[in-house]
Amino acid sequence: MTLFRRAFRLRPWQMLAVLMLGAAPAYGAADSPLTGRWFAEGVEGGAHLQVFLTLETPGTYLKEIRVIDSNCGVAGDAKETGSWTFQRGNLATISETVDGKPVTGSTADTHDLFRVDRVDDEHINLFDTETKLNWGLMKVTPVYPFPVARGCGV
C-alpha cells in the first residue's frame, strides 16, 4: 500500500501530524542545535567507551574515542572524521577517516544513523538505529579533557 493511500486511512488528527512531520525543516550544519562539542560514556559491544563528538559547520565532525580496560586504564584510542546531516530528527554520519587513514568498506560500515530523542543547550539523547543503544551526550567546552572513567576511582 502506498503512503498516499495509507494517508487517507488516517483520522484527521493523525493526518495533521503526518503533514506537520512532512513539513519539518532539514537543518544544515550552520543552523543546527547540534553543533558543538559533546561527551558520552557507555558500553557498546562489551567495550567501555568514552567519546567526544564535535559537530562542526559546515557539516563535518571529529569523533575522539577512548576504550577503557577492566583495570581502568586506556586500552586504545582513535580519531574519526567525516560529514553529518540532521534531518527530520535524525543525525546521519558518514565516516571518512580513522586515525588519518581513509575509511573503506560498504555503506553499512561507513554510514551511521541516530534518532535524536532530545536536544537542548546542554544535552543530546541519541538512539543508535544499528546497535539499538541509547546515548546521552552532554555539551562540553573545547578544552574539556577526558574525565576519569565511570566506575573508576581517582
Image: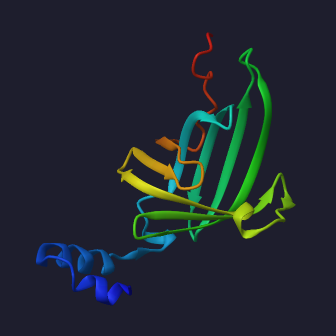
| Residue 132 in the image: above or below residue 154 | below
- Taking depth in this image into account, of 118 and 47 the one nearest to the observer is 47
* Total marks in image: 0
Q: Is residue 76 left or right of residue 6?
A: right
Residue 85 x/y as whole percent? 54, 69
Residue 118 x/y as whole percent? 36, 51
Q: Is residue 135 left or right of residue 14?
A: right
| Residue 61 in the image: above or below residue 65 | below
Residue 72 x/y as whole percent? 71, 17
Residue 93 x/y as whole percent? 61, 63
Q: Residue at x 68, y 38 (%)?
A: 45
Residue 95 visible? The answer is no
| Residue 30 in the image: above or below residue 67 | below
Looking at the figure, which quarter contains the C terminus? Answer: top right
Q: Is residue 70 left or right of residue 20?
A: right
Q: Residue at x 53, y 56 (%)?
A: 129
Residue 77 visible? The answer is yes
